[in-house]
Amino acid sequence: MCGIIGYIGYKNAADVVLNGLRRLEYRGYDSAGIALNDGRLYIEKTVGKISSLSDLIDVEKLCDYCAGIGHTRWATHGVPSRTNAHPHTDCAGEIAVVHNGIIENYRVLKEALIKEGHRFVSETDTEVVAHLIEYYHGAEPLVDSVIHALARIEGAYGLVVVSSKEPDKIIAAKKGSPLILGVGDGEMVMASDASAIVEHTRRVIYIEDNEILEIRKDGYKTYDLKKNNIEKKVANIDWDIARIEKGGFEHFMLKEIFEQPETVENAYRGRILLDRGVSRLDGLRLSDDELGDIERIVFLACGTSWHAGLIGEYMIEEYARIPVKVEYASEFRYRKPVLKKGDLVVTISQSGETADTLAALLEARAKGIEAIGITNVVGSTIARETGRGVYIHAGPEIGVASTKAFTSQITVLALLTVLLARRKDMTPEEGRSVLEDLMRVPEQIRRILQNPEIKKIAGLYGEKRNFLYLGRGIQFPVALEGALKLKEISYLHAEGYPAAEMKHGPIALIDESMPVVFIAPRDEVYSKIISNMEEVKARQGRIIAIATEGDEGIRRYADHVIYVPETHRMLSPLLTVIPLQLLAYHIAVLRGCNVDQPRNLAKSVTVE
Ligand code: G6P
């Protein structure tokens, strides 16, 4: 949600900042801007994507600038417009600021600054930061003025600030929004995430809340809010640049869908003890006794990660016999939830930065329960706050609609289920059988990915306006996820429903123009779901069924069948979701939608 970057070094800053913004664009893409600093500020901004911004900028002509900051926006305060785009400046045009987050008390500050004679031009909350720094930045150094300004600011921020009076440095600060510093040789680059850093250096420092960063081309200092020096550890990130490129695919989302055979494997690699029929998740750091003491599991998550949590609920309750509650993080934090000793709170978040999930985690902590995290992004705020948990190792997910992170989360939840279930009724043989099936999943996903039918079916239904997705049991969350994928990237109305609930409402929608996607692998509720198909058929609905290979009988009910290989019931969502991801993808492409950057969405939502 908004991407920010700052660079100082020996390279052409315009080039570095624009490239970095392209990498961060998935975080927000309604407007963008840069400010370059060599003792004078050069500012350019525009509505639209980074490509529109770079059309306005002649990078070669700006080769003298070796320091700059940039922003790609997802609007919270003020419509997307050139004026509201960042960077924002002070009255004198000497200070430029980019910001990710929300300044909650900006109205009060704005009124006070206007009384002091400051002139505001935008509707944003961010502009007050530039004026507030200006207010303090008379004779005092920029870093001091930033610290003074922060003392009056309430809310969340990742901030990057330059002043034309101090062109040899960039100041940054963080509270509640991510900020990483890349430490290069003769250059420093800071950004909202590592994707904008790895092409310059793999040595990074994770900035913590309430820390201030001062960078020059050959060094950096970190301070607390009282300007005491803080020592920071440099970490190495193991991504390489190829992992954040499209690698020959038309879209990141398609690339990420096709990466799933490897990403699922990465999620279980080293975590399976086949001879004992059990899994190991050392990062949980829970002793045998502590595992035995778990009386209830509470998952906290948003969006697709919440759907993964629902699948975890089905798995854990059925096999490990531990009650599970799955909470929308955004609701949990405000509804006075009851937590008690014996609860294991688990946050699930791809980015590790979702504001609601982070706040829910802090709410649990306030109630005396420390959470563990299932996270993708190493070093992200939630990963650091929880301090223990499981990384899903899916690699950078750039497409805004989550795909590979979802299957990796399910893989980890399956491992967690086996770990817990083996302490209860699951025998070593049963455990081994689930794990062996899990190890077959990558190959099975590969087979589904090769199925040409999915694209053909997409071609037949791209013109429809509404879709229903129905599933029972563990396939119900898969139905929710399939519907969400379609909504997110093709802007079609799609609803996921438990198949049996259809008759309590959605059945009224069904006529010959309504496609209904049934997730109907052969399982214990198969005959029930066939009855639901008959009900749809009787009302002339069009049926697309996701079914188990070899199930020819289902053709009697369905207009189209997409087959998936057979696997353990608990693992079946790992396979049934793949055709739904592809169906959504192909429909969105046919409709000419921007698959990787759907309108109004952002990859990681760092505001409430
Ligand atoms: C946003 C994204 C979704 C994602 C959700 C939760 O809404 O568009 O794809 O599922 O945030 O994100 P997280 O990073 O916490 O899993």
Image (cartoon, rainbow, N blue to C red):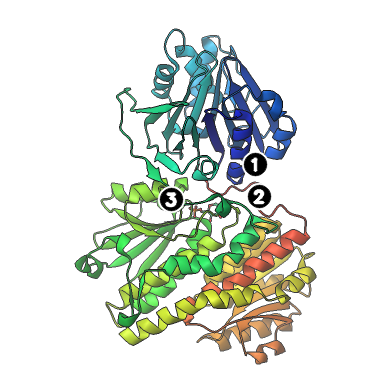
Q: Amino acid at mark 1?
A: Tyr
Disc 3 secondary structure class? helix
Q: Disc 1 marks which residue?
A: 29
Residue placed furthest toward the top: 139
Q: Amino acid at mark 2?
A: Gln
Q: How far apart are the two marked residues, 3 and 2, measured between alpha carbons?
A: 22 Å
Question: Which x, y percent locates residue 105?
Answer: 47, 27
Few, some or many residues within 10 Å of mark 2 (<14, 14–19, 20+): many
- Most foreground residue, 225 or 483: 225
Few, some or many residues within 10 Å of mark 1 (<14, 14–19, 20+): many
Instruction: Evaluate whether residue 321 shows in this view.
Output: no
Question: Which x, y percent locates residue 199?
Answer: 54, 43
Q: Which marked residue is nearer to the observer: mark 3 or mark 2?
A: 2
Q: How far apart are the two marked residues, 3 and 1, measured between alpha carbons?
A: 23 Å
Q: Disc 2 marks which residue?
A: 597
Q: How far apart are the two marked residues, 2 and 1, measured between alpha carbons?
A: 8 Å
- Most foreground residue, 60 or 439: 60
Q: Residue at x 45, y 56 (%)?
A: 376
Q: Quadrant of residue 399?
A: bottom right
Looking at the rendered image, the quarter that the N terminus falls into is top right
- Most foreground residue, 476 or 53: 53
Q: Disc 3 marks which residue?
A: 357
Instruction: Evaluate whether residue 261 shows in this view.
Output: yes
Disc 3 to disc 1: CB gap under 8 Å: no
N-term mark: 3 or 2: 3
